[in-house]
Amino acid sequence: MSTPMTAAEMRKILASRKIQRVVVLGANGTMGFGSAALFTTAVPEVTFLARTKEKAEEGLAAAIKQVRSPTVASRATTGDYDNDLVAAVAGADLVFEALTEDMAIKKEIFDKIEAARGDDSIVATVTSGLSINSLCEGRSESFRKNFLGLHFFNPPNVIVGTELIAGNDTDPAIVDFIDAFSQLRLGREMVRTFDTPGFAGNRVGFKLMNECAQLAGERGPLLVDKLVGPYTGRAMTPLATVDLVGWDIHRAIVDNVYANTNDEAHETNKLPDFMAKLMDKGVLGNKAGGGFFKRDGKKRLVLDPSTGDYTPEEEIKLPDLAYIDEVSALHRDGRYKEGMAVFLNAEGEYAKIARGVIAGYIAYAFERVGEVTETIDGIDRIMGLGFNAAPPSVLVDAFGAQGVVDMIGEAGLAVPSALAEAAKTGKPPRFFTHSRINIGRFFVAG
Amino acid sequence: MAAGSEVYILGGYQTDFARNWTKENKHFSALMRESVHGALETCEIAPEEVESAHVGNFAAELYCMQGHLGAFFTETDPAFSGLPTGRHEAACASGSIALLAASAEIEAGRYDLQAVVGIEQMKTVSSDVGGSYLGTAAWYEHEAEGIAAPFPKLFGKLGDEYDKRYGLNDEHLAEISKINYANAKLNPNAQTRTWYMNKEHALTHTDDNPAIGGRVRISDCSQVTDGAVTLFLASREYAEKWARGVGKKLSEIPRIKGWGHNTARLKFADKVAESANDQFVLPHVRSTIASAMKRAGIDGVDGIDGIETHDCFTTSEYMAIDHFGITAPGESWKAVEEGWLEIDGKHPINPSGGLIGAGHPVGATGCRQVLDSYLQVTNQAGAYQVEGAKNFQTLNIGGSGTTSVSFVVGI
């Protein structure tokens, strides 16, 4: 599936065709304008298209603001679907679809693209988890050959981890070309995934976040975000991430995974009922005033999932979590393995809950090998470089294989065979072998 | 252990220069520890093997309220307690000075395996305070006290001196900035990897790209960076044994083939006055580069496959181009216009992104340049690999062209 290419090979592939004109559809959305801004770093002409020209202009303004350079405008044009799509798509080398995550809406725009596009233009979708094969089903051979998923993470100009998803009929040469273009011209770290719901990153990453959301229903958001906090290997706590992403986006992703997969951790991908109920009342996360957490001036308020009411953070009494301070102090001095050993051996129900979530994440990732990516490496890189969270292999190396096997056992989960084998034989001595990706950055000191 | 040994580079490790260690709530010691352990793991060296350590650092006393950095090395692993260690300071050339000291000890036959750590944590203070700290690399009382952004101004004057002697078009400086930023996109540990830059932006004269030192704009500057790099240097005897252990031949292990080192007078005005009748604006820098080539037995820049130079500002890279002999003195613009500096060009400069693109943790930069040269000549530089590179040369500068060190790293 993925062949690592040398710089020389990539330059050769890159020289085989040109990307001079890119059209971005849905350029007023977050992924649309962010991706369009990214394209202007490498492409002389980028067309921002939206339902109306005004919306496209808003997208361009947002792109300029996001990357803080007025020069985006010198490489950009704007237009709407009714008046400008046909001409723009006809002249484009790459058509980039970034509409709402809705199969029907996307298919409707693909009708227009198919009618207008040149035979050798590439069509990419930024979908974060809809099926690439379904999206191009029934299209012409030329469309299917030139169609693929190019999944940037938000914000596209900042997060380098990117998923590349070929359909059954995608020309392998097109996949290699977009891979080389994204690496050399856009500075992306590319991870090739299979065409499965949520691909690799969202499948594994949102599983952990949703499990935390479920736990928040029982334990409250504040405690859960402390338990699965930075010390466990992430820059941002899980529920704060759900608030940032937006509850609607979170729901779309986990619902898609829940409806279209049936794996050993199926129920952890089920949206908690309280979230569905609160969403009916307009709770959507940061973009609509708050979610699990809410700002009130300088105060931080915390959601009570059962009532929908908010309580000031300082009024919530947390149990004794001294072990977290101990882990953080070790992380502060760069003693990450020692820190994780304290976590592994910490006593009490709360440390056990936290270990259960982390064990679930590691086990889930290792069980997805062969299903979402060819090897654990793809999952590792997208978790590290797309989610800014400790890759599963980094955690295994930090806890030790036996430690992880014990954790998974304690959580009552089945131990993936690669981990059981490593605990038994001591091989491989390390799972994460990228000497040019710092592992320390994932262990944030509280 | 034989006196006169050649000095081999077994490899090393760089922290991601995009990281902000204050935001990660981490102490200086974590930065050193990560780079040292990263290097031990990458090079498959047991801590017990290390015989001595040299730390290059500019100003931890100012940025981190912490001195005695050689001693901090012993904190990175229990096996290091008792090792001979020391710290070296020569402003932005501190890392190279540490490398020079370590390699001299290997040549002298004192030790067989040395760790060299270049380190600086700079994001602990505001940019104004940090700019003032950097001013101590100049003659502070004369050139920096009470002056905002003293170094951009000094290197703006370097551009002005070129302009006076030979003419200088700022578009060429913008192109240098653009190339460094573009190369940094290929480097997983470059600070500006995700920053937005193109030539139009580098030429933008608005609040998005203000002038801070005469003709020097924000896009002409290197970065304020937290970072550390650890390298292992070894004698021939140790390198032979180590190579066998990791399944390599000695001939595959890069060496420091040549070095150059000069120190000019501190004040920029004095340097320029001294060179008034010289074809090179900074003749001591030229001498450093030329002596490193000579010691490596390389007859001019055509024998060098790529350069990692000290682009603390675009003007210093512009200076390096003719001082390396890529063009005749004063004609650096030709190399820019011909595309020679790009990764697949005739004389690639800073495929890593350099100090502008990859970042400039002051005391670590000399070590970072040597590590990148090592990666290039061992074909491990990934997306920024210069195809077929066998010899790379560095140029590391402290102050306004004051301390210069250059290494030729090759197979």
Image: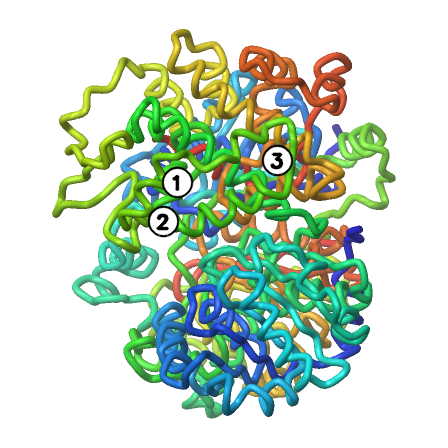
CA distance separating discs 2 and 1: 10 Å
Q: Are marks 2 and 1 on the same chain?
A: yes
Q: Nearer the viewer, residue B330 or A390?
A: A390
Image coordinates for residue A97, horizontal then vertical, percent = 57, 70
Q: Residue at x 62, y 72 (%)?
A: B324
Q: Nearer the viewer, residue A70 or B9?
A: A70
Which label sits on residue B120? none
In the rendered view, tell whether residue B376 sits above or below residue A80.
Answer: above
Side of B65 where B230 appears, left or right = right
Residue B381, image x and y in percent?
69, 54
Can residue B209 be spotted in the picture? yes
Q: Residue at x 70, y 51 (%)?
A: A195
Say what amino acid the circle numbered 2 marks: Leu
Q: Are the two marked residues, 2 and 1, in contact with CB atoms closer than 8 angstroms? A: yes
Rendering quarter of residue A51: bottom left
Query: The numbered mark 3 sits on a residue in which chain?
Result: B
In the image: residue B154, left or right of residue A108: left
Circle 1 sits on which residue?
A236
- Mark 2, residues whose alpha carbon is within 10 Å: few (<14), some, or many (≥20)? some
Where residue B407 sits, quadrant-wise, is bottom right
Q: Position of residue A402 (x, y in %)?
A: 64, 13
Element under disc 2: helix
